[in-house]
Every structure is written in C-alpha cells, then in structure tokens.
Amino acid sequence: MVYDLWLIERLDHGTDAYGLAGHSAYAVSTFARLLGGCLLRLSDQDPTPPDHQKMLAAGFDVIRQGDDAISAALDGIAKRADTEGGEPKKTFGAMHARLGDDLAQEPAFAHFHHLYRECLLRNWPFAAGDMVAGIPLERRRLHSLRSTWLELGIGQSIAEHFLTEAGVFAPDDKRPYSRKLFEAERYCRFWRMWRPWSGHKQCSRNLE
C-alpha cells in the first residue's frame, strides 16, 4: 500500500516523495483516515466496523496528489448535501467533529484545517458571525434561496426566477432551496437597488 511505504520511508529515513515533509506524520495520517472515511461513504464502501487501513489508503491516495486534489475531493463530498440535505456535521461526520472542533486550533493541522474550512465556505451559506470550523466568519460569502428569504425577506420563488433568468441556476436545477447557492454580495447589491426590496435594512447593513 502506498501509505505504508510512505510511512516507512518517512519514519525510517526521513524522506518524503510526495511533498508532505512540512506536515507531521501524525497530521497526515489523521487527515488521511478522516478523508478516506468520507470517500468510502461517498462510494458506498463504508465498512462496518470501520476498516482503518482502507480509510488511510483512500485518503492518502488523494493527499499525495496535492492541495487541488484534496479540495476537489472535499467538494465532491460536500455535493452530497445537494441530494441528501444536511449540514457539514452530517455530510462530513468524524472529519467535522475533529477538524471543526478539537483539532481546529492545533498548529500541526492548520493547513488541512484551512482546506476543510474553505470547502465549507464554498458549499454552505454561512452568515457573518457564524462559527465555521471553529473560527467566526467575518463576512457572508454565499446565500441560498432559503437564507435570502430568512435574512432579507425576499421570496424564494421570486429569487429563484430572477437567478435562473440571470443564468445562475439552470432551468432544470432540482436542488432544494437550501442548496441553491449564489454569491451574496453581488446579488444583494442588486436587490438593494431593485424596488420594492430597496428598503431591506439587513441587506444594507451587510454591505456597509
């Protein structure tokens, strides 16, 4: 197994063929196991009880390919929420519990924590002030049709029609309102100027 060979070389000789020398073996192994567990669930190969060797192998196969591969894998896992619904805790399971809580402030995991947090921000409509993987969010990045209704008072079907006409959503996009995401600032600016919604105070405050 590639992971086993990497670990032997790393521990016995201090060499690293995959550019992971800047990370501790413990951090890489822990993240590989967490990521691998998510990937196995995604492919319906999640064993019971958990097979840690398979989890390590699946996760490390992605990690050794670099940050772009890790981010793509995380985004692929996040897309499960489009059909299954749920928040990051449900989608990522143990990874969210570890990287989003007890390992969030561990320096050894800072890089992997950053990749995970950025994935969350790309795939969920967190509001300003929300705790995202243990760190408060300064400014909202995304809205969903549901959060637009809850926060700005704009009807979900009205917003959906406008954004579909604008090409943000495909006409046959069947995702639930909570998973139809779009750039918060860009369209909030438009709605602030578009009567009769120009008076929504929350939208104005978000843009100050």
Image: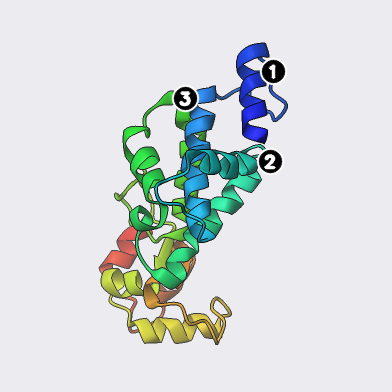
Which of the numbered marks, if any, corresponds to residue 200? none
Disc 2 crowd, CA 10 A, few/some/many (<14, 14-19, 20+): few
Up the image or down, 24 lies above or below 103; here it is above
Determine which residue is flagged by label 2. 65
Q: Secondary structure at mark 1?
A: loop
Up the image or down, 175 lies above or below 171; here it is above
Disc 3 crowd, CA 10 A, few/some/many (<14, 14-19, 20+): some
Q: Residue at x 44, y 82 (%)?
A: 160
Q: Residue at x 52, y 43 (%)?
A: 55
Separation of residues labelled 2 and 3 (CA atoms): 19 Å
Q: Residue at x 50, y 63 (%)?
A: 79
Q: Secondary structure at mark 3?
A: helix
The residue type indicated by label 3 comes to Ala
Q: Nearer the viewer, residue 116 or 45?
A: 45
Q: Nearer the viewer, residue 99 or 14?
A: 14
Which of the numbered marks, if any, corresponds to residue 15? 1
Q: Secondary structure at mark 2?
A: loop
Q: Position of residue 38 (x, y in %)?
A: 48, 51
Q: Position of residue 75 (x, y in %)?
A: 54, 56
Up the image or down, 155 lies above or below 207; here it is below
Earlier in the chain: of badge 1 and badge 3, it is 1
| Quadrant of image for the N terminus | top right
The residue type indicated by label 1 comes to Thr
Within the image, what quadrant is residue 155 found in?
bottom left
Q: Position of residue 62 (x, y in %)?
A: 62, 44
The residue type indicated by label 2 comes to Gln
Q: Position of residue 182 (x, y in %)?
A: 48, 68
Task: Tell how many labels.
Answer: 3
Q: Is 193 situated left or right of 55 in this image? A: left
Determine which residue is flagged by label 3. 108
The colour scheme of the drawn protein is rainbow
